[in-house]
Amino acid sequence: MSCVAVKPPSGGRWKVDVIRQLKRRDQRQHEAFSDLIRHYSRMLEKSSISAGFLRTARVPSGPESLSQNDRLKTMTGELACQVVALQQELNIKQKVLEEQQSRLAGAQQGASGAQAEEQALQARAAGVQAANAGLKREYDALLLLHAAADARVRAETQRGAELLEDVIRHKQQAAARLNSANERRSRARQVTLQKDLRAAQETPITMDTPVSTSPPTDPPERAHTRPFRSASASSPRILTSIKELFERKRRGNSVCSVDQEAFRPGRVCVSARVPVRARHSLDAHEQGINAVRFSSSSDMLATGGTDRVIKLWDVQAGQLNHRGTLDGSAEGITSIEFDQTGFKVLAASYDKSALLWRIDDSVPKVTLTGHSRKVTAARFRGCPQQVVTGSADRTLKLWDLQKAACVSTLQVFSYCSDLVCSENAVISGHFDGQIRLWDTRTASCTLELPAQGKVTSLDLCSDLRQLLSCCRDDCLQLLDLRGNNRMTLRAEGFKCGSDSTKAVFSPDGRYAAAGSADGGVYIWSVTNGDLQTCLSGKHSASISAVSWSLSGDYVVSVDKSRRAVLWSDI
């Protein structure tokens, strides 16, 4: 009968493993005792031979029998010794076998523990993989949401830019219509005046002297009447009267009212005093300060910083007392200016606009939008309702505050860093190292003056004869606008700290002051260009701007680390 091998079921695989392990154990034990078994087999063979020999052999008598007995005893003793030795080896092998069995049991136990740990790790890995798969799905969903949100942001940004362009275009169209209407009215007035002048010139005005009816022998007293001569329209007196009438009419329609042109009285500076020590220092803002300016009365100053607010401070007895905060700017402030009355504050901002506040109201009254990049400077020009702004978009814009509209745009040739202005002229400083003079009546550049480097600020002397410029080549320049004479102000240790560092004249025009990157305030004499003093020890960061009070008593400096310091000689 042939034997057919039956394949154990998959569930009985452990039986096969047990049989295989038993066979391996038997093989190892057989190898360990193979020598012992071989010696034992040889001993059995010898003992069987001895037994057969004893059975078959006759027992001799006499001395021969004794010698055989001795040999048998000797052989039996040897065999007994071998049995004892083999027994000892067997015991040793038995102990080794027991130790190996104990190690095998420990190894099997460790293997079972490792197998259980492996199963636990596999289960843990499966859980981690499932968690990772869940996180991957969440991440993919977040990516989709982010892509959708990014698309919406881009769409809204594009929409906002289009809306801004529409607003600017509508304002430009409105300003163009207003300018066109004003020009038509002006031409109509001129035509009417010319007609009136021609009519007055063609129609003489005369008056006859009265004739006396009394007899000639009794002449009456001469009447003190003055005969009128014919008046010509070309007479200087008539032209002056008409011009005054036209000027009065135009002033009546001007945006500058009598109340608005009322000047707030302040202390007049006869001789500015060079400060020698700090009277008060404080952290004026939550972030760096970019601009500072005294009011015309010198009893108040304004500071503006990257924290998007303007703070007003009362100057009393050498102390700065917080008066109020003007907010409404969407980004940091770049420049500040008071009007002549001291009741309005004009500021330029990084949010591409200029804003106007009243000092008693924190909400801006007028917001001027139209630049495509940050506005770096905003100044009043002549009338308090006319403003000039300069921007990084390489334009200067003239604004009418009453209409909150741009009335003219000057295309400049470089980034405008600062500007100063009078009634009909604007002087701008640029990053291409040029200072340009503009005639606002013709909207054209009339003069270009080269500077020593990138211009960071401009200031005009009170007598309108000298221009002070600060440049990135670590020097200040004095320019005589009458003769184009130049003087360079330098000092050891002075370094222009940023592209917007501001330098100013003293109110009497005898000194120039600027802040340095090392935290010192440097003051020069305009007469001979010598350094008068360096005020240090209060600023730990680069000074961004300084301002000199119109009374000449105080100088204030601000830096990029929120610090404002009031200096005086008292």
Image (spheres, grey):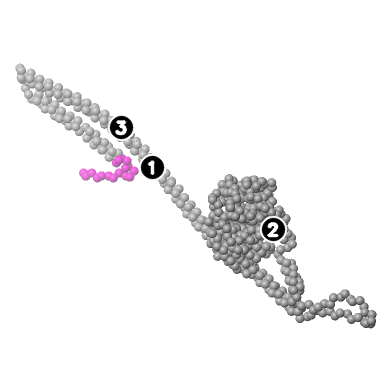
Q: Which residue is mark 3?
A: 102
Residue 71 visible here: yes
Q: Which residues are magenta?
A: 1-17
Q: Which residue is mark 1?
A: 119
User: Which amino acid, mark 3?
Assistant: Ser
For discs 3 and 2, the disc positioned in front in the rendered view: 2
Label 2: state its secondary structure.
Answer: loop
Q: Is residue 81 left or right of residue 63?
A: right
- Where residue 568 appears, as percent x and y from the top left, is 65, 48
Label 1 environment density (alpha carbons within 10 Å; few <14, some 14–19, many ≥20): few
The front one of 450 and 24 is 450
User: Which amino acid, mark 1?
Assistant: Gln
> Which of marks 2 and 3 precedes in the sequence?
3
Image quarter hosting the N terminus = top left
Cα separation, mark 2 vs mark 1, equals 87 Å
Label 3: state its secondary structure.
Answer: helix
Residue 14 lies in magenta, yes or no?
Answer: yes
Quadrant of residue 247 within the rendered picture: bottom right
Q: Is residue 283 above or below residue 440?
A: above
The front one of 462 and 89 is 462
